[in-house]
Image (cartoon, coloured by chain):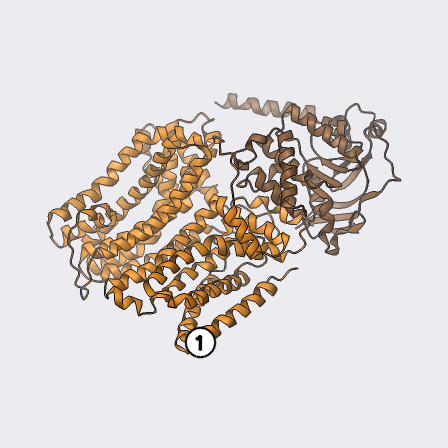
Amino acid sequence: MIEIDTNSEKILSISNLTMRYGATNVLTGVDLDVYKGQIIGYIGPNGAGKSTTVKIMLGLVDGYHGNVEIFGQDISNGDNSYKQRIGYVPENAEVYDNLTASEYLTFTGQLYGMDESEAEYKAIRLVEKFGLGDVYHTRISAYSKGMRQKVLIIASLLHDPDLIFLDEPLSGLDANSVMIIKEILAQLAAEGKTIFYSSHIMDVVEKISNRIVLLADGKIIADGSFEELKQKNKEGTLEEIFNELTGFDQHKQIAEEVVSIVKEVGNNA
Amino acid sequence: MRNFLSLRILDRFQFIFRFLGIEYEMMRKILAMKLTMDQRRVPTIFNQSKNKETGNQFFKSLGLYALYGLILIPFIVMGDHYVFQMSIVFGISMFILMTSMISDFSTVLLDVRDKAILDTKPVKKKTISASKIVHVSIYMIQLTGAFALIPIIVSIFVKGILFGLIFILEIILIGLFIVVLTALVYIFILRFFNGERLKDIINYVQILLSVGIAVGYQVLIRSFEFVDLDVTFHFQWWHIFIPPMWYGAPFELILNQNGSKAIILFSILALIVPLISIFIYALLVPSFERNLQKLLNNSGDNKKKKLRVDRFWQKVMCRTKEERTFYLFAIRMMKQEREFKLKVYPLLGMSFIFPFIFVANFLSMESFGDLSNTKMYLTIYFINIIIPSIVHMVKFSGKYKGAWIYRATPIQDQASIYRATLKAFLVKLYFPVFFVTSIVFVSIHSFTIILDLAVVLAVAFLHTIISYKALNNELYPFSQSFAFAQETNVANNILMMIIGGVFAGIHFIASVIPFGLYGYLVILIVVNLVLWQKGFRTS
């Protein structure tokens, strides 16, 4: 595990971030500082506000309160040039899939300020590395889920960003591709890139993150390296720590109840 | 789930389904689910917080169909040349019903989700197919009902019960015929093609059909000779290929006691063809279901497209790098997004036909020589009528969820997004229609009208930017679900179309003033330059 070096450059700083959708408080006060080279595993139960936090930082969602600074710049100041240095893989692989990978990648590359030829040259080689070379000019709509995911990952890295937001990036990928991505993330972090990784797959988060941030009910309830969390909570795996911190210890009981309800169908018939 | 009226009516006829070996209870549940889905609309990503309009969009649209239906009334009450009048009535009906069927209900016929959701359950294949047909039929009945109810009532009062009865019977036959015909066309295509290609072909057929029916309707009118409203009907062999004429025939046969061979033949066709097509459909449905699988089959070409022409225009039309990026993106979306094409290309096709309809109308009365001396070329303004509709459509896409990239990326000049998209619309969609029509008019009127055409082109640019200001509200292009495409400011849309007419009027006035057109063109160019520069407010 890499030690958190708080002396290095502060990439991201959130203070007292709150957000409401109508009557529901999604975020109730998030404070977080992220430093260069960290891989943040951003975890939490469904509906805890993980995606909302990420979307706020990307400027996809307006109407939050509090202060969000990225690369030392307040993102609400109207200057969106900070996005130049950000890469993003959205959840659910949302993409204009009537375009081909070639068209989509050069388009997004250009939106990040690259030249078309530069984007094209880089994209085609990355696509080859991910094994998509023979479908490069095929519409993304004909891709499998894993292939779409790879396109989105390439799109997020094409412009060599310094801060990368990944929302469940491994979904649909086969075991070999997962290994490649994990290794890529580790090497990018070693190069000084900062990675913000949200996922529900605890053993992946446990392995790749050097800092884990656990969000529940709209605020951070745990923050530290896996080792630190383990010491505090006296539990073996991140999954168990997650269960304990979110106050969840009834999985056995619920499972038993579910099974007994499932079995009822036979009785009625 | 609501207990739908249509299903309660269906309950009365459940014995038929049971007799056919269909699990009625299952079918009813599937239908209830489908009807509930029809009523709900997909929320859009950026509009979540804004006013969520509740209410059934579909029933509101039925009101619109009732309004369309009023068009039929004059043709019904006009006189007693039934073949003529009723052919027009049924021509219009078939046009409206078929286009709605294709544009709104193809997704039901071609729904592949059914495979994963329903086929995996212990429900008979037959039941699933039946529920599909009943679902489409319910839609068709509601649509036809809304459309034809008022004309039917009027016809009973004006023409008597017998007329009304024939009308009702025939409109039912037509409804059946259209549902089955649409399905048959899909069956035919599905047999021979594959995957992505197939989706493209269906898309083109949908577009072609929509335009084709519009043209067919014109042919229908032209197959009669107008002489002081004294319409004479001469049977010609090709009339047999115009289905609306079949349906005009029974009125002539029964009410006018016209027993000529052609009339009898047509009347028989009117009755028999829908029944035969149902039979063929029932025969082909199993292979249809099998071939539907092809829609899930992921395969496509892997060839890089050369865009020499697009690249040329990209450089001509766009100044900044950002604008060029969005220009190419918009071009590709317009070329490759099927749902967008399905909504927009038929509009283009019809606008293309309009000027020629007027020319043809003129030629049927006057000579070609007279034509070149008129200002008939001004009918080219009919092309501009579609500008507001398409500018309005540009903010929608079937793939709207990809629109997060607009906000996640560091776009410097937000104005360039829309400026580029509108330019792409003008070059990719408007120019082809405009230039082809222009060539035709130049060949009729000689090169003296080049100045006029330049004015029309300048007006098109102006019309586009004005429509954008009136209709688009700073929404990103291709960022909204088509589910919202209907609930828009109809008043503004109509106003924008009227503006098209106003432009034509100004053009006419300018053309009678000496050097008026030169002055007008200069003014247009200046206004365009200013508006295209400053018109895109950015926040």
Within 10 Å of disc 1 (Cα), the crowding (few <14, some 14-19, many 20+) is some
**Which residue is the site of mark 1?**
B516
**Relative to B365, does residue B203 appear above or below in the rendering?**
above
Q: How many marks?
A: 1
Residue B118 in the image, given as x and y percentages of width and height: 46, 30
**Relative horizontal placement of residue B36, taking residue A59 as reference (left or right):** left
| Residue visible at 68% across and 39% down in the picture | A158
Q: Is residue B417 above or below residue B373?
A: above
Q: At x 61% / y 45%, what residue is drawn?
A: A107
The location of residue B324, given as percent across then percent down, is 59, 52
Foreground pick, B109 / A159: A159
Is residue B136 or residue B473 the one in the foreground?
B473
Query: Which chain: brown?
Result: A
Quadrant where the C terminus of chain B is found in the figure: bottom right
Tell me the SS state at disc 1: helix
Indicate left or right for B412 with B138 as reference. right
Residue B370 percent coordinates (x, y) = 26, 68
Residue that sits furthest to the front in the current view: B447
